[in-house]
Image (tube, rainbow, N blue to C red):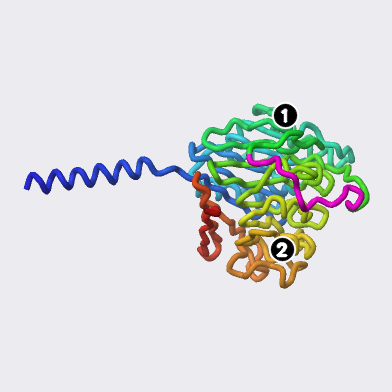
């Protein structure tokens, strides 16, 4: 009897130690804000980072959807809010969100470069909220001090990192000559986007906001300063002035997630690049794109099909330091787990 009791105690203690030693994951919610962006990260430490807040108005639709994700994640404040740039579909929801949940730290590229009345009004509404918290001016090469994961700023205010981050530094064989780039220079807020590399052990994810083609080129050509990533959030919602093949192929993602809307983003050109990216194992979308047609992901991998518009289903990722991660469609519970190459 004593031996059986001793064995039972040993097994219980062993199981308890194994549970205690299990690494906590990084949780990521890709929130449906109808073709804008709002992505919630919850670090293994429990700290939170929200990237963008979607649109204003719509009876507080986007702020309520963000709040629902925060409640699902069990967080009661936003430790860091990163605003990639000052366009309505990224910064517009800040005042409404701040009325629902505390925001402690605000990270952005500074001031808007769009000085028309609409651009100034958007920025001023955001600035009033920002003044109540702690402001961090984003600069390429900086890290956002979140405990439990690494967040590196790759681009901000029209500039990109001038040195490779760990994991980057190889020449990019997909780069065209600069003279072959599409003509023109983007002088809008898009080119000012704060771009992020999020790392947890072997797991790496990139979010470049709405960064456009010439800034993408500067980031990865002729040297890929980022390296490969496991997860790629489509830049600029999958519009065809971002997400060129020379950056997507160089990033070599296992999984791409599109934060498009039914009528915004998801262009055939951008989705073709994703489908042809070497090493791609999974493609998920927040919405079925009316423009993309057969280039859309299979219906089970789309959070909000056209027949189910405006329901606000999210896509959740749970990532571990060993590089494995699981993607789940909240609409139907469809999950896929991806593992890094051996």
Note whether 223 is above or below 249 in the view shown: above
* Residue pointed to by mark 2: 276
Q: CA distance from mark 1 to mark 2?
A: 36 Å
Image check: 150 left or right of 261? left
- Who is closer to the viewer here, 245 or 86? 245
- Who is closer to the viewer here, 32 or 336? 336
Look at the image and give the residue range highlighted in magenta. 167-181
Using the rendered view, name the quadrant where residue 110 is placed.
top right
Q: Secondary structure at mark 2?
A: loop
Q: Position of residue 286 (x, y in %)?
A: 65, 59
Q: Position of residue 227 (x, y in %)?
A: 67, 45
Note whether 258 is above or below 154 in the view shown: below
Q: Residue at x 49, y 38 (%)?
A: 46
Q: Is residue 225 visible?
A: yes
Q: Residue at x 51, y 62 (%)?
A: 335
- Who is closer to the viewer here, 161 or 312? 161
* Residue pointed to by mark 1: 137
Tag shown at residue 252: none
Q: Is residue 128 visible?
A: no
- Mark 1 or 2: in front is 2
Mark with earlier residue (1, 2): 1
Q: Residue at x 64, y 59 (%)?
A: 279
Q: Position of residue 175 (x, y in %)?
A: 80, 50
State yes or no: residue 273 in magenta.
no
Image check: 176 left or right of 148? right
Q: Position of residue 70 (x, y in %)?
A: 54, 45
State yes or no: residue 171 in magenta.
yes
């Amino acid at each position: 009897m004593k031996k059986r009791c001793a064995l039972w105690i040993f097994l219980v203690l062993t199981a308890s130690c194994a549970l205690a030693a299990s690494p906590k994951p990084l949780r990521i919610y890709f929130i449906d804000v109808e073709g804008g962006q709002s992505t919630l990260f919850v670090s293994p430490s429990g700290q939170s980072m929200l990237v963008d807040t979607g649109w204003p108005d719509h009876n507080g639709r986007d702020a309520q959807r963000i709040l629902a994700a925060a409640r699902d994640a069990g967080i009661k404040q936003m430790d860091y809010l990163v605003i990639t740039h000052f366009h309505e579909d990224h910064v517009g929801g800040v005042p409404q969100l701040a009325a629902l949940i505390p925001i402690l730290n605000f990270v952005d590229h500074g001031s808007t470069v769009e000085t028309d009345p609409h651009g100034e009004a958007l920025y001023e509404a955001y600035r009033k909220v920002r003044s109540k918290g702690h402001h961090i001016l984003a600069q390429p090469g900086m890290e956002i001090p979140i405990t439990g994961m690494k967040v590196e700023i790759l681009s901000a205010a029209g500039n990109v990192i001038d040195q490779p981050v760990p994991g980057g530094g190889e020449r990019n064989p997909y780069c065209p000559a600069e003279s072959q780039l599409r003509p023109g220079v983007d002088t809008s807020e898009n080119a000012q986007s704060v771009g992020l590399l999020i790392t947890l052990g072997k797991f790496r994810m990139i979010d470049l906001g709405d960064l456009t083609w010439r800034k993408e080129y500067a980031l990865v050509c002729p040297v890929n300063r980022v390296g490969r990533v496991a997860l790629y959030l489509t830049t600029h919602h999958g519009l065809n002035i971002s997400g060129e093949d020379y950056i997507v192929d160089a990033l070599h993602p296992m999984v791409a997630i599109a934060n498009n809307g039914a009528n915004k983003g998801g262009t055939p050109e951008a989705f073709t690049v994703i489908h042809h990216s070497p090493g791609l194992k999974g493609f998920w979308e927040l919405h079925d794109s009316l423009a993309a047609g057969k280039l859309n992901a299979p219906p089970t991998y789309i959070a909000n099909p056209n027949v189910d518009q405006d329901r606000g289903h999210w896509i959740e990722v749970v990532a571990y330091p060993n590089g494995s991660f699981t993607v789940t469609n909240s609409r139907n519970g469809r999950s896929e787990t991806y593992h890094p190459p051996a």
